[in-house]
Image: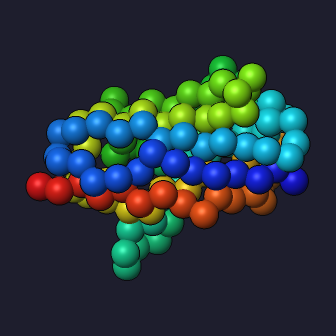
Amino acid sequence: QVQLVESGGGLVQAGGSLRLSCTASGQIFSDYSVAWFRQAPGKERESVATINWSGAFTSYVDSVKGRFTVSRANAENSVYLQMNSLKPEDTAVYYCAARRRGATAYISWGRGTQVTVSS
């Protein structure tokens, strides 16, 4: 199963931008769809963005549409989440997760990266 490591989190002011990276190792990354999840204190984890194995199909939760963009570079074993116009409510730990093509469950998870947006 693929191993995932997130990076790129940090502290940013409202209206600012961050780019998260999810780097994979251990398996052929192009066999996996990837999702970005986030979890804020006291809240349930939610799926923020998904991208299929080829990068041709993406989806977003309504609260980030028009502000976040997910992309991938399979040659670099990486998936990215570009986050613009950040809001304090985007503050959370962000995780990437991978699902093998044809599977229904995300079985590979990174350890997360903290994103904090100050008002």
The residue sitting at 17% across, 48% down in the picture is 13
In percent of width and height, residue 51 lies at: 63, 34
The residue sitting at 77% across, 53% down in the picture is 3
Residue at the outermost left position? 119
Q: Which quadrant of the view contains residue 78?
A: top right
- Where does the C terminus fall, quadrant-wise? bottom left
Q: Would you place residue 29 above or below residue 12 in this image?
A: above
In percent of width and height, residue 38 lies at: 47, 58
The one nearer the camera, 6 or 82, is: 6
In percent of width and height, residue 76 lies at: 70, 27
The one nearer the camera, 53 or 119, is: 119
Residue at the outermost bottom position? 42
Res. 65 in view: no
The residue sitting at 78% across, 59% down in the picture is 107
Q: Is residue 63 left or right of residue 118?
A: right
In percent of width and height, residue 19 lies at: 42, 37
Q: How is the image coloured?
A: rainbow
Q: Which quadrant of the view contains residue 115?
A: bottom left
Res. 111 in view: yes
How many numbered callouts? 0
